Image: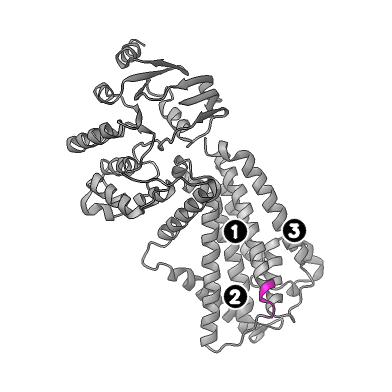
Amino acid sequence: MTTVLKRNNWAIWRDVIFALFVREIRTGFNDKFGLAWAVVQPLSFIFMMSYIRGRMDGGSTHTVPTFEFMLYGLLLVQLFLGTLSGCSSCLKKNKALFAFKQVQPISSVIASSCFNFLIKIAVFILIFVIMYFLKMDFEIKRPLILFLNVIALWIIAVSLGLISSLAQCYIPEVSKVQSIITRPLFFISGVFFSMQDIPKEYWPYLDWNPVLHAIELSRHAAYSTYSIEAVSEFYLFSFSLVSLFFSLCIYHVSWKQAISR
Amino acid sequence: MIKLQNVTKFYPSKLGNQYIFKNVSFEIPSGHNIAILGSNGAGKSTLFKMLAGSEYPNKGEIITDLHLSWPVALATGIHPQMSGAENARFIGMINGVADLDQYVRRVRQFAELGPKFDLPVKTYSSGMRPRLAFACSIGIDFDVYLIDEVTSVGDANFRKKTREALTQKSKNANVIMVSHEMDELRHFCDSAIVLHQGELTFYNDLEQGIAHYQAL
């Protein structure tokens, strides 16, 4: 008969996360476009936007080529929004799976967020490969710093997504409020503009937003001539640590009741 | 042995908390095939979910050293977008089955879904999903199978097959079963737990339990 392995807790975790991850891939892209859509959609958008902005400023935005300026803005904000919405819907979506006691809610959050992260990294690399073959000039001065910024932003998205996901188990209206709050994020996170386009006295109205910090810092990491007077690394990293801490606390206290309702 | 210690369970609702269990302590003895009897809404499925660890009590805890199955209800944990084979593989992976290919082959054989086994579950008829769910659980060796009315949905042929498989299993495993069909229960179970108004009562003799349940 079937042999069932005696596994320790870590092995169970690893197997469950892997299984959920495979399931995520399998169900995430099951139309005809498949994985290609994940690349085509942002790419077409970046081309469109950078064409419009490039017309206005002649191909270079504050010393960064307009295409790359848009690239960082758009991909990072999409990473944030995609991960946030993926994580925040995943408890509800996978509720049926918590019937298996091996599947804990955090495993599904980890699987969904890693999936989103890998997709976006793949798109990122692919776009650079395309740029290389189109013989477009690009440089990444400090790739590690860039990577660190992306990770910090991703952690913020996962933490906020986890909190919202737990909250939705108690108060379903949270998902509606979340969609209202995240909608303007696209326009206030510096995707289409730089803080240098904005008069200094208005900075405080935009500066609270960690996504804006991540985007501006990433542009700076790629082109050190790009000014980051308005943003700070300290804010981005401390925001990510604090939100991660709080989300894990909330998770630890509430996960058993959240799936038992 | 499964032990319930001061278990309180309620579901919040518009009319305040709906208590299913209030401070219940109980011991489910091992070595019995147990029928759970109770009217609709008495908390049979809730009890199942808590035993399996799908849900947790609001207060108190449930202690067991046995390897319990998940509550095999009509289509627990089956994803409609994935095919039967993929679902089986997923369930096997989560439960730590050593040889996944062999397990999927066995589920395919048992479920008898034919070519539909490789199509998404959403194309299945309502009788086929429980067949898949049941085949997945019977393919894994558990100490206790929690069966929630699954055996009563299939056609005559499949029912015969589930009977044989469960009888085979009950040699070295136990069954805890919910069903409203007494014949079904008489076939598999030797003792009963009657669930009435948040109280559990164990009857060593099934007939005694059924008589008591029908007198309620």
Check whether the beta carbons of the residues at disc 1 and disc 2 lie within 8 A of each other: no
Residue B18 position in % (x across, y down): 52, 24
Question: Under tag 2, what secondary structure?
Answer: helix
What span is in magenta? A141-145
Query: Are dots 3 and 1 on a single chain?
Result: yes
Which mark identifies residue B208? Answer: none
**Earlier sequence position, callout 3 versus callout 2:** 2
The number of numbered discs placed on residues in the rendered structure image is 3
The secondary structure that most of the magenta stretch takes on is helix
Label 3 chain ID: A
Amino acid type of the residue that numbered disc 3 sits on in the rendered structure: Ser
Q: Which residue is mark 2?
A: A71
What residue is rendered at 50% in x and 75% in y?
A44
Question: Under tag 1, what secondary structure?
Answer: loop
- Give the Cα separation between the discs numbered 1 and 2: 19 Å
- Give the Cα separation between the discs numbered 3 and 2: 25 Å
Amino acid type of the residue that numbered disc 2 sits on in the rendered structure: Leu
**Earlier sequence position, callout 1 versus callout 2:** 2
Q: Which residue is mark 1?
A: A183
Q: Nearer the viewer, residue A211 or B98?
A: B98
